[in-house]
Amino acid sequence: MKIALLGIGLMGYPMGRRLCDAGHEVHVWNRTLGKAQRLTSAGATVHLHPVEAVRDAELVITMLDNGSVVGHVLFELGAAAAMKSGSLLVDMSSIKPIEAKDHAARLSERHIAYLDAPVSGGTIGAEAGTLAIMAGGKSASFDLALPVFNVFGRATHVGPVGAGQLAKLANQMIVGATIGIVAEALLLCERGGANMAKVKEAITGGFADSRILQVHGQRMVERDFAPRGRMSVQLKDLRNALSTASEVGFEAPITALFEQLYAQGIEHGLADLDHAGLFVELASRNGMS
């Protein structure tokens, strides 16, 4: 399949490599050219402009920072106008459901199908091909994209346009809050004199065990906060969740609390840390290193 991939960042790069390795004809674009050029060795064709990348593509994937950036690339830089009639746009970015619906409607006017298909699993999942993919849109579009999704991981069709983004918001609400309570619990144990690594080992396999405890908890034990998913991105997702909750008349006090904690961590210079870096903010509040 001839595929265009727009956005070659932390997630887009390993996803692009997997598409090339699977034998697809891959055309890539990134605002920072050097990031896209890393994929030339894998067989991708790099373009200077998104219009060039999407021309004649059967399927276009966007993996960009937020809904505003997706809209800018599609409708202001001209990518949507350059896509051929009957093609499919799969937005794998994490954006607001209302933005996904708007983009789908505007693309439909050009006879371009649309799926919102955000992912969970981070760079580890992108590299291993084990991402969880939550797709919203028509069943026919999902069926068309499924062979490509299978290159990245496991895809689930969760409903109409916007439903994929709702599922991702649910994912990020759970991830953000769980990172926070794991950090707080481990720090409490350390303050009380217990060994954090041994506490993590002790509760593994019990009801408190989770993927977050194993992956992000280990990062906390090792003080390893190199970004896989940044604090700033986690905050963006929590704010999107709160905005969506407001739109549908839903109160989300737990998400609101963690939005404040991540925001305060970013105010204190932690924006580019891994989202497990909320540990640093909570440690600082308690005068811990």
Image: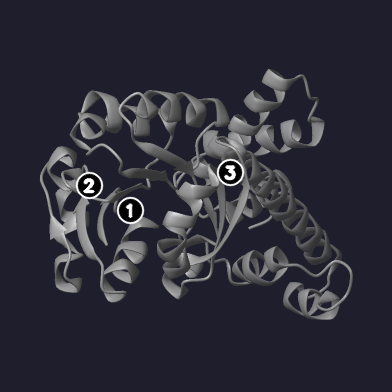
Residue 138 x/y as whole percent: 53, 42
Report the disc number at residue 30: 2
Residue nearer the viewer, 214 or 247: 247
User: On the rendered image, what quadrant is the C terminus found in?
Assistant: bottom right
Please identify, in this view, whether the residue under mark 3 or under mark 2 is nearer the observer: 3
Q: CA distance from mark 3 to mark 2?
A: 24 Å
Which residue is located at x 72 percent, y 67 percent?
213
User: Residue 29 at x, y = what percent?
Assistant: 20, 48
**Among the 4 quarters of the image, the one containing residue 242:** top right
- Between the residue at mark 1 and the residue at mark 3, the CA separation in whole angstroms equals 21 Å
Question: Of label 1 and label 3, which has the lower sequence position?
Answer: 1
Q: Is residue 110 visible?
A: yes
Horizontal relation, residue 20 to residue 288: left or right: left
Residue 89: % across, % down:
36, 42
Circle 3 crowding by C-alpha within 10 Å: few under 14, some 14–19, many from 20: many
* Tag 2–tag 1 contact (CB < 8 Å): yes
Three-letter amino acid code at the position of disc 1: Gly
Secondary-structure class at tag 3 = helix
Looking at this rendering, what residue extends furthest in the right direction? 207
At horizontal 73% and vertical 47% (from top left) the residue drawn is 177
Q: Is residue 25 above or below residue 69?
A: below
Q: Which residue is mark 1?
A: 9
Identity of the amino acid at label 2? Asn
Q: Can see residue 230? A: no
Q: Nearer the viewer, residue 257 or 166?
A: 166
Give the label on residue 63, or none.
Answer: none
Residue that numbered label 3 is attached to: 164
Q: Amino acid at mark 3?
A: Gly
